[in-house]
Image (cartoon, rainbow, N blue to C red):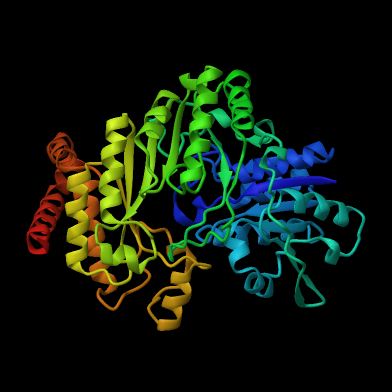
Amino acid sequence: MKILLISPPIWNITGESMSTSPPLGLMYLAAILELKKYEVLVLDADAENLKYTWDDLEARIRKEKPDIVGLTATSLTLPALFRSAEIIKKVDPGIVIVAGGYGPTLEAEKILGEEKNIDIIMDGESEATIVELVKVIENNESLDQVQGILYRERGEVRKTEMREQINDLDSLPMPAYHLLEPHYSTYTGVHGELLKMPNAVMLGSRGCPHRCIFCSNKMIKVRFRSPSNICDELEYLRDKLGFKSAQLYDNEFVGMTANQNQWVGDLCDEIIKRGLDNMEFLVQGRCNKFIDLEILKKMRRAGFKWVWWGVESGSQKVLDAIKKDIKVDDIKRTFKLAKEAGLKSMSFIMVGLPKETREDVAMTAKLLREIKPELVRIHITTPLPGSELYDTWRREGKIEEFDLKKYDTRHFVVHHTDELTSKEIMELYQMLAFRFEHGRLYFIKVFFKSFLSMRGLKKIPGRIKKIFKYSFGWLKLK
């Protein structure tokens, strides 16, 4: 039984590769399958140095002749998954196509009803599911005995009993980097300039107990790996594979609860004890009352360099509307303590949130000027399928576009609110990005560089127009 796990080449649709880091979920599945003696390969067809065309993908399927193909996607990359499935079935209709990831899972019944090339969708954590599923397919047995899947039988979509989440995360094997194509060292990282390269990806915990309405994550129960287990993996990544840094994909590595602080402290102690503090780490955090200065200082001593904070807005009214369950004062305090601890911070901001007005956006700008994060990332609020926001706005008729290719949070506004039109949301987003993502100095440099080439000279009128537009926009906003 040969299994090919693929991250589809979304670049064929969007024009650019979205795969900057190794596909962690697929590498976990590959490791589990390899332990069970199956022949398995992980192909990141969207990786920058591969960038498979659809013809490349077809040729690879013909060459490998897999029995099962697993495809993963987010909501944004679903169109690439659908096209990949079509190509695979064209090569061999007998290949079983299994889909997983947030995209297929959140609309599983709809997808199985409409996309006839997809045979099975795995629902929830899939490490145990994939083993049972492959065994059943191999023995030509009934799928109804496999927990945690949806499948099509005689034209009807069937759903099996939900599988329990994995409680003992230490029981999972290390991700199978050795089964990945391209080589793991070729990835640039989400923000490769922030950390020493090559950069590994890993999880210290799974789940998030919070209730933000824009989030489609349904894993509420939080489970932690033991510090010793995490450090075993870090030692392997550094000493055997040559990684110099790691990004932890935990929903909230720090700031969830008071008990989490103890876990973070214990992990930092273990990292320092084993001499792993010569690596660099990037994590995500939550700005709330549980942020503790001593924990942040210990993180810095252990090699943690960056924390990405979900700020979203500088307006308390808006934070309450999206059920963020934090206070503006919590945000200010968090960034102050992070600076005191020597940690660098990135602030994530969203524009076009429920109840947000131009005045609220001005409050966000004021907050950013006050907290002074090292980096700022502005996103357009996007109602992802599976989120409370999607359900609400769809019911209220506020979603204007259902083409998932446009759900990229950076280039398209797919909704309006009671307070702002889609055009106004885009203008406010562009103004915030212009002001805070690069800063004034960046645009001064770009402007003067325009005189160094004919191409640059041609862009000068447009750049002057943009500068005046946003400058006057800020004056009006204030």
Q: Is residue 477 left or right of residue 225?
A: left
Above or below residue 351? Residue 184 is: above
Above or below residue 27? Residue 399 is: below
Q: Is residue 351 left or right of residue 164?
A: left
Name the spot of residue 432 as percent of width and height, x first: 22, 54
Name the spot of residue 470 as percent of width and height, x first: 13, 56
Q: Is residue 242 left or right of residue 159?
A: left
Q: Residue 450 is drawn in which quadrant? A: top left
Q: Residue 149 is drawn in which quadrant? A: bottom right
Closer to the camera, 113 or 375?
375
Image quarter hosting the C terminus = bottom left
Above or below residue 253? Residue 477 is: below
Q: Residue at x 44, y 52 (%)?
A: 15
Closer to the camera, 277 or 150?
277
Q: Residue at x 71, y 70 (%)?
A: 116
Name the spot of residue 356 as percent of width and height, x first: 26, 68
Q: Is residue 350 left or right of residue 119?
A: left
Work out whether residue 426 can be spotted: yes
Work out whether residue 199 can be spotted: no
